[in-house]
Amino acid sequence: MEPHGNLKRVLAEEIRAAIAEASPAPGAAAAGGDAGATDSRGALRRAADVMTPSVPDRAPLAAVKRLAIRGFRFLWRNQSSFNSLSLHASAGLADSLDRLRAELERQADELRRRAGVQEARLTLAESAAVGRGPASPRPAAAAAFEIPPGVYALFEERFRGSSLQIAGAQRSYLELLRDLPGPVLDVGCGRGEFLKLLASAGIAGRGVEVNPVSAESARTEGLDVEEGDALALLEGLPAGSLGAVVAFQVVEHWSPGEIFRFLQEARRVLAGGGVVVAETINSDSLSALRAFYLDPTHVRPVPPEALRFLAEAAGFTETRIEYRSPLPAGERLEEKSENEKRLNALLYAPQDYALIGRVPISA
């Protein structure tokens, strides 16, 4: 049997070792990986360490050691510390999982869109190689598609923003489109971001898109999208058959005559109580004009009051202009004087605006 002094020394050394293991090393950091997940794993390890050490059955003086551990466990086992570390680890893991899930969804969305664009470009190239002509005449967009549709689809991929960004910017329009007297037509629906939002809100909707690449990409997502000229489609619809017509970043691609024709046809096909929404670049903001002239298919900027006048001339009432997409404070002048406020209004005003008009319920 070991001397009494040796037993005390062994027990003291084991207690000191347990306390040292329970204390996290200062400044320790895991290399690589997600910082939140690394911190969470460290917290879980520390939480496990502060639990009561165990003694193997065959260890020398196992019974005595267990008795000593139970007697001195207050030195290293602190229930509140364990609870705190456990909660911290759980919260960190949850945050890391949320970030990972969002990133995976973003990457999957990006891969799907790029794959759709590439496949559509190859299809168009193969069609041209065997002598197929254009799908159908599109007079309103003839100038736009002097640029090949596949090339313009790639242009939008690079400069317009991801589907998640566009959907986030368009989501607020849903409140205008509830309890309408008919379905929604999305003119120039592109990849179908707004049609997905409508579906998620239980609002019936369909789209029309002149670019065959974007139209096919939207159809592969299960959306009801027709390829063709929006103005021709509107002319073929029965009067009063729709609840809303929306056009996001479209009217700047048309001449003034085409814009007025669009508004007239939208007024005709909307039932009483229906609404038209036309969003475009804010020509009153000089900084926004950079985005306007970036797109080679834009025809001309459309001033807000001019678009509102045309809507009223086409028969819409309760028209209003809503300014959207304000610049962050860091991209505007700090307003310390009235002159700086005026400069902000001229140079750094909101980048977009939306015309909203209604058809009288009695119509």
Image (tube, grey):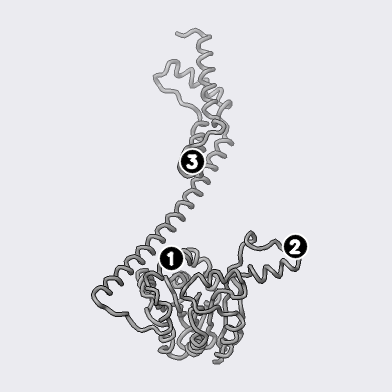
Q: Considering depth in this image, is 18 or 145 the residue closer to the camera?
A: 145
- Residue 105 x %, y %: 43, 58
Q: Residues within 10 Å of mark 2 (few under 14, many from 20)?
A: few
Of the numbered discs 2 and 3, the one sitting upstream in the chain is: 3
Residue identifier under label 2? 336
Q: Regarding mark 2 in the picture, which secondary structure is present there?
A: loop
- Residue 219 x %, y %: 36, 72
* Residue sitting at the far right: 337
Residue identifier under label 3? 38
Of the numbered discs 1 and 3, the one sitting upstream in the chain is: 3
Q: Considering depth in this image, is 53 or 316 the residue closer to the camera?
A: 316
- Foreground: disc 1 or disc 3: 1
Of the numbered discs 1 and 2, the one sitting upstream in the chain is: 1
The label on residue 157 is 1
Amino acid on which disc 1 is placed: Glu
Structural distance between the alpha carbons of marks 2 and 3? 45 Å
Can see residue 262? yes
Amino acid on which disc 2 is placed: Lys
Q: Considering depth in this image, is 249 or 185 the residue closer to the camera?
A: 249
Q: What is the count of numbered marks?
A: 3
Is residue 222 placed above or below 25 in the rendered structure? below
Task: State left or right for residue 324 relative to residue 137.
Answer: right
- Foreground: disc 2 or disc 3: 2
Q: Residues within 10 Å of mark 3 (few under 14, many from 20)?
A: some
Q: Considering depth in this image, is 109 or 3 the residue closer to the camera?
A: 109
